[in-house]
Amino acid sequence: MLRYALLRLLGAIPTLFLVIVLAFLMVHAAPGGPFDDERVLPAEIEENIAAAYHLDEPLHKQFIRYLSGLVHGDLGPSYRYRDHTVGELIGTAFPVSLKLGAMAMLLALVVGVAAGSFAALRRNTLLDRSVMAVAMTGISIPIFVIAPLLVLLLAVRLQWLPAGWSGNVGATKFVLPVIALALPQIAYIARLTRASMIDVLASDFVRTARAQGLGTTAVVRYHALKPALLPVLSYMGPAAAAILTGSVVVEEIFGIPGLGQFFVRGALNRDYTLVLGIVVFYAALVVLLNLVVDILYGVIDPRIRQR
Amino acid sequence: MKALRLGALLAASIVLLGALLFACSDPASEIAAESVLHRGLSSDPESLDPHKARSVQAAEVLRDIGEGLLAYSATGELVAGTASEWTISEDGLTYTFRIREDARWSSGELVTAPHFAFSLRRLVNPATAAFYAQMLGDIVNAKDIISGELPPAELGVEAIDERTLVITLERPTPYLLSLLTAPSTFPVHPGSIAEHGDAFTRAGNLVSNGAYKLDAWEPGSVVELSRNEYYWNNAGTAIDNVWHHVITQEMTELNRYRAGEIQITGSVPPDNFAQVRQEYPEELHIAPYLGVYYYGFNLTKPPFRDSPQLREALSMAIDRDVLVNSITGRGEEPAYSWVPPGVDNYEPRRFIYAEQNQEERNAHARRLLREAGYGPDTPLQIELRYNTSDTQQKIALAVQSMWREVLGVETTLVSEEFQVLLANMRDREVTQVFRSSWIGDYNDAHTFLSIMESGNPSNMPGYESGKFDDLMRQAADQVEPDRRRLFLEEAERVLLADHPVIPLYFYVSKHLVSPEVQGWGDNVLDYHYSQHLSLAPTAATR
């Protein structure tokens, strides 16, 4: 088992290396540089700044410098946030994005599954129809429309919640972003759950369970819920991806200091090291998560381990 | 029947969500004893090291935590800062500053003349890689130090004693005093740089000499400042804490203002401007600002090289009133000069056609275009590049249609990401007409005119005029302000007659300022030191 994990980990190194090379080349190929501005610097000062950040070296030297830093766990200094290193920025931004994403995922699962099951049990009633109508609307309206509407209603008009992210408010600052991020997923999960629950409820083993005299609650809890959740579970992967990309938009709208926001700013400012650092970080994260999933598969299914 | 339990689960989760909505503490409850001013900041400062900072946003924070030899009042007048008084020699080359006896760092130590000398040398030291090193280019030996030919110790700055600082210039620079209000000339604390190196700007390490000191900086979120008890004018500082909230989206900022979370906005979104004007007529502050929005011509390539008539025709055919009234609509002023109005001791020259009405200008423009060799049989096709944004696009579309209707000139619009446009403007290979802007660094016509000197790196059109350069050089040698002003004004006249650029409009500053904030003053530099502000008693209830 350990050997399997180690082998997989070694196998990830070429993938990561390729990601780094490609990202490095693409970032540097973009026109403009990190210190360009309408206020063009005199040549001597431009040289001094380039020298301070080793931008005057040939590209391959810069790459080797970057790699050797990376091996030592150093993602380099940020060009735009000159008082901070990329490692620090990721270290403060990732927990924010993670919290936001995890809360949105949890909310989407709980509300989505509950609403979907409820609709399936009350199939073709007015309640079912209205839940599904709301879900359809949720899927169709993009986050960048929903989020400002939520802000206008709950923050500006009613003043129940903060309109944006700021240090002076507590947990309330999470509420609107989490809802905005979760809403489309709630809708999707509700529809998925409803469809699969209807299928399962119509299946033979449910009929058998009912024939044994079990009530609806028991049937759903002990027999129907688990199989009905399978499609939802396999949707978790895409949902995580959607929440990750959605969080870039939500972070922008609410001004949340998460990774997505730093990534977008980094790209616009040509903050080479920041963009590279976030790409490398995400790549490593994806590789690691895949590895964990593979190992879990191995735990569940011994045939995979033996291969 | 039992399906109801599932319904109960659903209900429970909604209740849970609701509880989450309401249970959390009230945002304002922490603010009770000490007054806090919440300001919007459109991006993070890149650095709180005054020598590494560059942006307007960094300067705004730095003006709260640091102080130069001089400063500005709330209404934009030059006033004494850390220097209490100064004298200027008759030839205008030697400035002697007296540092306040009670000027102290946030650590309680005295701010001394040697600290200023250390800081100014650090600014021009190539190893610092300061963006604004050239600002002090007129101090003796500064240019050679920046280019690495002389050691920083050779800078014409000397601390005669603990409280006397002498700055020696290579040529009279009448705007030196206004330069000495800029954050890049603020003193840095030598002891903490020696102790912490690059990390001296961190909260906990940073020792500063302004009205406030740094408590915390969460990148992308907030910069928190609190009162510097040792500041010489601490008694005159009303607000205890200042939080600069980093809010990149103007719309988000407006929403947060409406929700009462911030008391001063950095801007107002263009799309909501009319609504804001109606909603908050008393709180909206619009004031002229030292900035010009312009279209530049690439003068190194045809068709605009050697064709001043063509450039003039295109310039005349643009109806600026339409642009500022129907498109930008935030009180901007149509531009018929290069230097904005409101610059100290200066009267901007204007295009000769500024006195005509648009009909006359159009007729004149058509005549010029014919003289330049274009007409129905030889139509002109040009290209206009601008950076991707709603406002730029609308203005470009309007100009495109004006040029078509008035002159029959067909314009291709090319929208590019800002950094791409910058790279293209600098290369001068593919550009023909491009959109750009210039924001004044200090309150003097020189900050606008000097970028048009031959070889100035920010001279985007590639304008080269011996006559203009001569006038600028002569102006630089004048000690007498009124004589200098005549040379600068003449230089602007020459510049306008050559039409290297089409100034379209002058910017305005736009802020929403909550009624509880007192002491706010509109000024052309758009500087608003938090120490000049105070909060009305109602603030405590927010």
Image: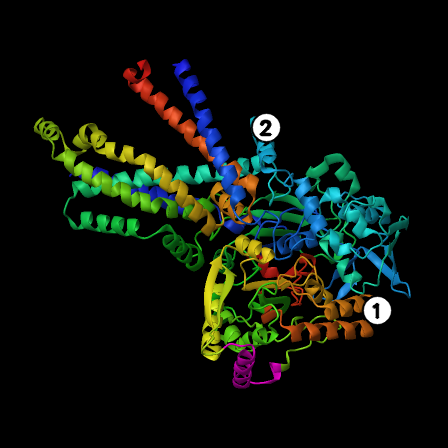
Label 2 and label 1: CA atoms lie apart by 55 Å
Lateral position of residue B389 relative to residue B72, left or right? left
Q: Please give the name of the residue rendered at 76% of the width and 53% of the height, measured from the top-left corner.
A: B185
- Provide residue B357's location: percent of width, then percent of height: 55, 85
Magenta segment range? B353-374
Q: Please give the name of the residue rendered at 70% of the width and 53% of the height, measured from the top-left corner.
A: A42
Instruction: Look at the image and tell me in which quarter the N terminus of chain B lies.
Output: top left
Q: Chain of mark 2?
A: A
Q: Please give the name of the residue rendered at 72% of the width and 76% of the height, measured from the top-left corner.
A: B347
Which residue is denoted by mark 2 in the rendering? A68
In which quarter of the view is residue A236 placed? top left
Instruction: Look at the image and tell me in which quarter the C terminus of chain B lies.
Output: bottom right
Which residue is denoted by mark 1 in the rendering? B478
- Provide residue B410's location: percent of width, then percent of height: 45, 71
Q: Nearer the viewer, residue A304 or A114?
A: A304
Q: Nearer the viewer, residue A21 or A223?
A: A21
Three-letter residue code for mark 1:
Gln
- Provide residue B74's location: percent of width, then percent of height: 70, 64
- Provide residue B190's location: percent of width, then percent of height: 79, 41
Q: Please give the name of the residue rendered at 33% of the width and 35% of the height, measured from the top-left corner.
A: A237
